[in-house]
Amino acid sequence: MAMKLGTFQWFSLATAAPVYILIVLGGLVSSTGSGLACPDWPLCRTQILPTFTPAIAIEFTHRIWTLVVTVLVVATTVLAWRKFHWPNRVTQLSTLMFTLLLCQIILGMVTVDTRTLPAAVTSHLAVATLVFGSALATSIVSLTSKGRLAR
């Protein structure tokens, strides 16, 4: 029998995938040395919309995709709280995902401010992995709760 996915389950899955894409974009930033193309944060070369070079385009895409992921993570967390209430494994995991994303954003700023110090870059990747893990866990728990959460 096919499992019918609820709105939250679809939305949580639709959040996990862009988080993974964000990690891949971060790898592209790192591997191309584009991290310092925008030496200030949150602006890029003191502008909201900078003049694009290939390196700036890579770094700027990473930043814009972070904004997309942030909106999705916030929406997933709000939906979890509205649908499942606290305390619940789904609300706990989505809140963890949101909290880790806030840490990740701060680490992104630190990475830029330290001019891509290896410890900052590594920490940024480590927390990104935790954000992705918590996004997946949120989806998996919501999908495997045997219908108790599908209301």
Image (spheres, rainbow, N blue to C red):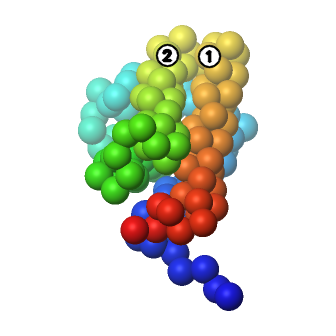
Looking at the rendered structure, the secondary structure element under dot 1 is helix
Depth order, front residue of 30/1: 1
Query: Circle 2 sits on which residue?
Result: 110
Residue 10 in the image, given as x and y percentages of width and height = 49, 69
Depth order, front residue of 93/151: 151
Q: What residue is at 50 percent from the left and 63 percent from the top?
A: 148
Is 106 drawn above or below residue 51 in the view shown?
above
Q: What residue is at 59 percent from the left and 41 percent from the top?
A: 134
Label 2 Cα crowd, 10 Å radius (few <14 / some 14-19 / many 20+): some
- Label 2 and label 1: CA atoms lie apart by 7 Å
Q: Disc 1 marks which amino acid?
A: Ala
In which quadrant is the C terminus drawn? Answer: bottom left
Residue 113 in the image, given as x and y percentages of width and height = 47, 14
Q: Quadrant of residue 3?
A: bottom right
The answer to whether mark 2 and mark 1 are in CB contact below 8 A is: yes
Looking at the rendered structure, the secondary structure element under dot 2 is helix
Query: Circle 1 sits on which residue?
Result: 120
The numbered mark, 2 or 1, whose residue comes first in the sequence reads 2
